[in-house]
Amino acid sequence: MNQQLMRRLDAWVGKLICLLLTMHRRFTERFNGARPLDSILFIKLIEQGASVLAVDAFERAIDLVGRDKVYLCVFVENRPIIDVLGQMEKGNVFALRNQNIFVFAIDLVKMLWRARRLGITATVDLEFFSRGSAIISYLTGARYRVGMHRYTMDGPYRGDLMTHRISYNPYLHTAVTYRAMVEALSHPVGEIPCNKLVVTPESTKKAIFKPDPVEIAEVESLLAARISEGSGVGGPRIILNPNASDLMPLRKWPTDRFKKLAELILEDYPDALVILTGAPREAAAAEKIRDDLGSKRVVSVAGATTMRQLITLFALSDVLVTNDSGPAHFASMTKIKNIVLFGPETPKLYGPIDGNPMPIWAGLACSPCINALNHRLSPCNNNTCMQVISVEEVMQKVRQSLHGRQQRGVSVHHEPSLPTERYIAQSNLGGNAHVL
């Protein structure tokens, strides 16, 4: 399904279903008694980057009910990062296909049937004000349901389907909000608004990725196959991610700015390697940028890497310049200098929370215009907030990042120091990731 169809279904069909289910709840739930909390299902359908921000929430749920009792419902294209994180059992991830409404409906019915068969006790809806996720949460039959509620706001109507109704706080970073939503399960059902507790960014666990030697060799081989003989590269590796999700094209920095930035990097650092990344559907655009630059020191790996290989590439490189998108959060699992360009959203809510983030945000009076209350759908027809970010401003961040860089092979990104009390995404996807 395309994004516009999904939004229309959520807006029109979703409202009616939420109303009907609210009436059903008011009649039937009075007969439901308390149940011990023994399993938790998260609903986070879209945006892989947000799953990195949810690492601490997932970890807290594991503390509460055990790893084998934590589940996640996600669109199938957003599953790869979940497998990299390795926090959940593979069989506990409900991956819904959404090529069209019929395939989605089939997978959804299967997922709901299995959720009821498992007797899942609680759901945590991380989609904030989506009606679709609220409907899924209710239809699982879970006794406890945590999710956003508009209360006195003129915000999106999604019925009254949650037992633990969270009041949206636009001053909390999203990672903190996610953690607080899990903590709400320890609060009484009747608390209004739910979640009278303190959670700070400093108290959250972060994800750290540690590639193994085999993965490092694979990525080095991938690069070697694309580097022309005699190109003279051997210095810093700078990754450019010039695309953003089709879900929110307003987040894109102009392509010609990325080209100009690459030209400055090649000029200032004669032995630098510029690497273009992107999803498979972005491969052609990345290759055109490479061809336009016409340098042997520019290569494209867009569409050529797995999720683990992409993050390994981040771990083996010096600087990433990216729009506000999933790769910004994937890179936060490594020690790469992470220059993230924000415009219609703000780093105060959605910025990477670990690694070496270096956000650039113009802070126009109209920004952020994408938020949870407008279903992240802005009326903007000209993303001036991205256009006012100059090439020179970004280049200054690149120079700052590379200042004092050590020689390759000794540089910190090859042997990342791993802080304690943090979650580590190991190379073994069988579930041996752990908290030190």
Image: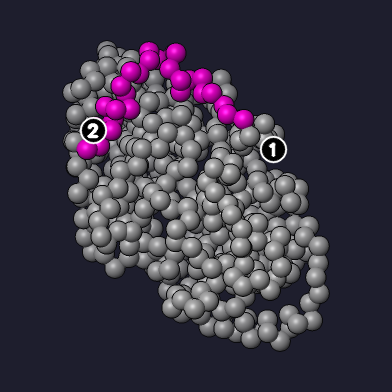
Front-most of 404 and 430? 404
Q: Which segment did they paint magenta?
A: 393-420
* Helix, strand or loop for the magenta stretch, by majority: loop
Q: Amino acid at mark 1?
A: Gly
Q: Amino acid at mark 2?
A: Met
Residue 224 in which image quadrant = top left
Q: How is the image coloured?
A: one colour
Residue designated by label 2 = 395
Residue designated by label 1 = 431
- The x, y position of residue 403, in whole percent, is 30, 21
Report the number of numbered marks: 2
Let me know if residue 337 is in the magenta part.
no
Q: Secondary structure at mark 2?
A: helix
Query: Looking at the figure, which quarter contains the C terminus?
Result: top right
- Mark 2 closeness class: few <14, some 14–19, many ≥20 residues within 10 Å: some
* Residue 301 placement, left or right of 362: right
Seen in the picture, residue 294 relative to 49 is either above or below; the reply is above
Q: CA distance from mark 1 to mark 2?
A: 40 Å
Front-most of 241 and 279? 241
- Mark 1 closeness class: few <14, some 14–19, many ≥20 residues within 10 Å: some
- Residue 272 visible in the snapshot: yes
Seen in the picture, residue 101 relative to 425 is either above or below; the reply is below
